[in-house]
Amino acid sequence: MKGAVITADTENFYQDLVESQQDLIVKFNLEGRLLFVNSAYCDIVGKSRVDLVGSVFMPVSGERYSDVIATQMTRLFRPPFSCTVEQWIHTPKGMRCISWSAKSIVENGNTVLAIVATGRDITLLKHEQKAIKKKDEELMLVIESGKQMYYSHTPDHVMMYVSPRIRSLLGCSPHAGKRMWTDFLTDNPMNAAGLERTIRAITSGRREPPYRLEMATGDGHIIRFEVNEIPVVKNKKTIAIAGSMVDVTEKIQVEEGLAEAEYLIRDFGGSKNRMGRPTRVSSARAKGPLDYFRSLFSREPEEKEDE
């Protein structure tokens, strides 16, 4: 407080308060030299206060961090005169990661006199984050190695999560921003039925049967998917749709080809030869088109016609 008299008791009170903290507390000047360190900082670096005061305090332990930390610390010289940086330092117990929260001591509104920083050891948290990231990568590897490709979207059809394989197929960049999955639909009538099932699932909160969609990439390539999805319901309200997709483009092409072949075989099977007798392929009526073509290519050399 301005104008307040600092007594010995007051000074001792604040000194006890600072020294009893588990967090690291330092004060350094504009040249980066330490003006004050508390006991917690001395303990973690394994040096005495006499050795540390006057030494250079550099919150960076490797060249790869220097640009990031330098950029963050420029905030100490403009409003709000504060920043947060992470520093890996050598200690008697090995490398430790310290998260520093720094604040400038300012005079006359914009003149920085010194900087005070409090640090907390977050090494354990960093190791846990690294372990979680590794597990996430392993899980993603398992997920991405199967046929199914996973996604989720909001009730408004805005994509929340899209499998990297889906992005690759559709040519959708991960940095393209939020998009609606309906942007990729073609004008194929099958899409109307699929969209209707999604809307029903959102409205009712109940799972709908699988359906098929036809989508187009940025270069006009057509891909067809078989979709299996389920609504995510919270407090009796659908908050998202999660599902999986399988690329069935080739499968549908085969199905369409067989259907067309069956139509042609049916017509051909009903024709008659010049003698007025049914042609030999009329037996195709009793077979599926796939069996019919198998019989053509696996048939033994035909015997001579009836003499």
Image: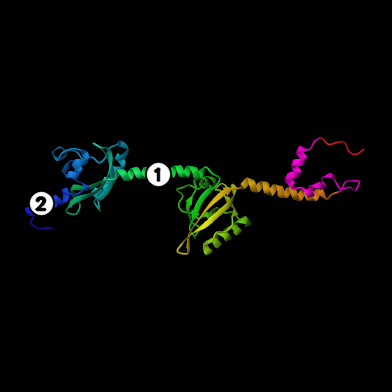
Task: Evaluate whether residue 28 shows in this view.
Answer: no
Instruction: Identify the residue shown where x is 80% and y is 36%.
Output: 300
Q: How is the image coloured?
A: rainbow
Q: Label for residue 22? A: none
Q: Residue 41 location, x and y as percent?
A: 20, 43
In the image, farthest residue toward the right: 307
For residue 157, above or below residue 87: below
In the image, farthest residue toward the top: 301
Numbered range of the magenta stretch: 272-300
Q: Residue 180 location, x and y as percent?
A: 50, 55
Q: Earlier in the sequence, mark 2 or mark 1?
A: 2
Q: Residues within 10 Å of mark 1 (few under 14, many from 20)?
A: few
Mark 1 is on which residue type? Lys
Mark 2 is on which residue type? Asn
Q: Label for residue 133? A: 1
For residue 196, above or below residue 41: below
Dot 2: element: helix
Q: Where the N terminus falls, by quadrant?
A: bottom left
Looking at the image, residue 180 sits to the left or right of residue 226; the answer is left
Q: Where the C terminus falls, by quadrant?
A: top right
Q: Is residue 25 highlighted in magenta?
A: no
Q: Label for residue 12? A: 2
Q: Residue 25 location, x and y as percent?
A: 20, 47
Q: Residue 138 location, x and y as percent?
A: 45, 42
Looking at the image, residue 42 sits to the left or right of residue 220; the answer is left
User: Disc count in the image?
Assistant: 2
Looking at the image, residue 280 sits to the left or right of residue 106; the answer is right
Instruction: Identify the residue shown where x is 84% and y is 44%.
Output: 280
